[in-house]
Image (cartoon, rainbow, N blue to C red):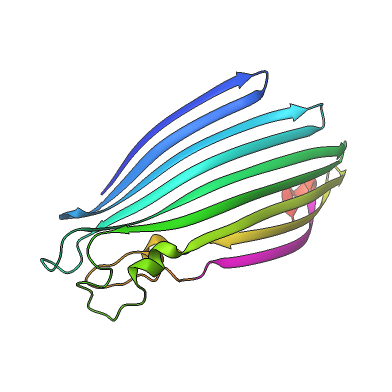
Amino acid sequence: ITYSYRVNASISSDWGLWNAQAYKNTVVAPGIEQDKNNLYVAQLSNVFKLGSDHTFRINGEYRYNEADVIGEINSRDMDQMSFNIWSIGGMWNWNMLDNLALTNAIRFDRMGFDYDGTDFNSGAPLNAVVTVDEYKARVVQEASINSGLVYNYDADNIFRLTYARGIDIPSFLEIALQNSLFIGNPSTPQTIVNNYEFGYEHNFREYNTIVN
């Protein structure tokens, strides 16, 4: 069962377009009211232009994810495992020519962990993988990057050159969940993917088809 609450506000000013958003998602295991996951998110962004050719976007985000897990039935009290992510990022779009544009974006994330409850290993049917101190001590700090150059040769031919550095942070299940069947491992490493791409797109107007 999932419950969601959201509030959103936007305002246009001399300093650009501001947008603020906050929401909460709650997932409850059917029939087990004590076994639930709460996600809290707050976001703020501003989009503005300098001149006619430069568009900027700055944004910040706070994300808090917590899970109440009862572990083996009747074996121990409620435990709560959680992590939080602070993020800040920016984007710059430069229309260099009428048919040539450059877009750069970067985002930095800092992820921390917390635990409240009985000993991390109590009630688990498997051997422990980490201690409470190891769980709380882990910090993930990574930057993700996107950069792209787009050249419109004409109305039917487009060339793209892009680079991306993506971060895949382990899910809450992999990092923190602990119940009677599963033990998460907070030391599970994040995955970093670097991607380089050259692309070409042609519009076959007579066939109403785009090939790239």
Measuring 81% from the left and 50% from the top, which residue is drawn there? Answer: 149
Q: Nearer the viewer, residue 31 or 11?
A: 11
Q: Tell which residue pokes out farthest to the left in this image.
A: 74
Q: Verify whether residue 190 appears in magenta.
A: yes
| Residue 181 lies in quadrant | bottom left
Residue 103 position in % (x across, y down): 76, 45
Marker count (numbered):
0
Residue 24, position in %: x, y? 36, 41
Is the residue 51 above or below the residue 209 in the image? above
| 105 in relation to 118, above or below | above
Q: Residue at x 74, y 52 (%)?
A: 147
Q: What's the residue at 33%, 52% (across, down)?
A: 66
**Residue found at the far top of this picture:** 14
| Residue 184 lies in quadrant | bottom left
Q: Residue 84 appears at what percent x and percent y?
A: 43, 51
- Residues rendered magenta in the picture: 189-202
Does residue 91 appear left or right of residue 75 in this picture? right
Q: Which is more toward the observer, 132 or 18?
A: 132
Decide: is 52 above or below 87: above
Image location of residue 37, percent across then percent down:
30, 52
Outermost residue to the bottom:
127
Q: Is residue 212 visible?
A: no
Quadrant where the C terminus sits is bottom right
- Determine the main secondary structure of the stretch shown in magenta: strand
The foreground one among 1 and 13 is 13
Work out whether residue 200 or residue 211 is closer to the camera in this orientation and state it.
Answer: 200
Q: Is residue 89 visible?
A: yes
Does residue 68 belong to the magenta stretch? no
Residue name at image x 31 percent, y 78 percent? 128
10 vs 58, left or right, is left
